[in-house]
Image (spheres, rainbow, N blue to C red):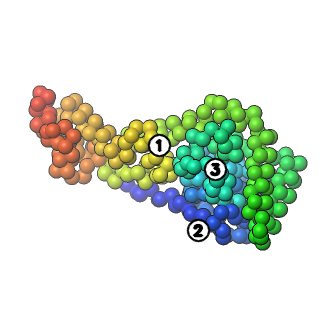
Amino acid sequence: MSATPPVPTFAMQQRSERPDFYIRDKRGGATATTPHRHEYFQIQFNLGGDTVQHIGNVQRPFPRRTLAFILPHRVHLIPHPEDGEFIVINFDQNFLLPHLACSPLDLEEVSITQAPELSPFRFQEHLDFILDTEQFAETRALIERMRRLDSSRAFGSREYLKGCLLQLIGSVCQHYAEPLQALAATNAAQASRRDAMARMNDYVRRHLADPELNLKKVAAATYLAPDYLSHWLAKDSGKSFSDMLLERRMHLARSLLLNGRKPVGEIARLCGFADEAYFSRRFRQAHGLPPGQFRKREGVVEG
């Protein structure tokens, strides 16, 4: 079985010239060509060259005059055409939301009443932020102002930049107020999380026999960041990924022991254990008896 390639996570200092805010066009650095995530917020502005954006397991159109809003730790990819033109804006959480003391992994739980600035980031998987001709011209002028400010930082530049950033986000929120508020009312972000967890559960169920199944592999296969997956699993169930995986393997082992005559060695393999002795040890820890004795106690005759 081929290994799933890891999804890289970029820190602000890896992709930006400054630790708080950075804006560039395609000449300012190479863009990622495979799915990735980063620890900071990102806004991309397509100036020319129709393409698509992959965010989580969703694909949405990304034509010219479109803005993309990407939360920290969200797996995504925008494959820009060779002749495309775009602007990338990177900024950390403290730059945008210094008053919000929460983990970046909890941003989807923050009410838009508390932080309306988060609205387009939270609901990017559900909306396409395509600007009309007038909005495109206004946004492009605003972004050019931000580029000039960022290229020669001076006293007050940071506050001016933040004002421009809020103006950009506020303009999108105002224009898309109705669908954004409707999505917030229906808890679309929570629904997305439930879908993500459902994808995880389905993948684990189908690959339970893989002895190399682990958090990173499941996260990559289901378009989730490992930290995100681990965080929400613990929040929803109180379990770590390894505890959840062992619990499911023990459940399958009990079912196979009680509902068939497969040898213990084959059951170990079907439950993802390459070592029968290790499987027996873990089963005994969970149930107080090794698999063979457990089966005999329940009156099942081994085949």
Q: Is residue 37 placed above or below 252 in the rendered structure?
A: below
Residue neighbourhood size for the residue with mark 2, other residues' Cα within 10 Å, grouped as few (<14), some (14–19), many (≥20): few
Determine whether label 1 and label 2 are within 8 Å by CB: no
Residue that extends furthest to the right in the rendered view of this protein: 134
Dividing the image into 4 quarters, which one contains the C terminus? top left
Q: Position of residue 65 (x, y in %)?
A: 79, 51
Q: Which residue is mark 3?
A: 99
Q: Let me know if residue 42 appears in the view.
A: no
Marked residue nearer the N-terminal end (3 or 2): 2
Q: Is residue 5 left or right of residue 272?
A: right
Q: Which residue is mark 2?
A: 14
Q: Is residue 65 left or right of residue 193?
A: right
Q: Which residue is mark 1?
A: 232
Residue for point 37% across, 46% down: 240
Q: Position of residue 271 (x, y in %)?
A: 28, 43
Mark 3 to mark 1: distance in Å? 23 Å
Mark 1 to mark 2: distance in Å? 27 Å
Residue neighbourhood size for the residue with mark 1, other residues' Cα within 10 Å, grouped as few (<14), some (14–19), many (≥20): some
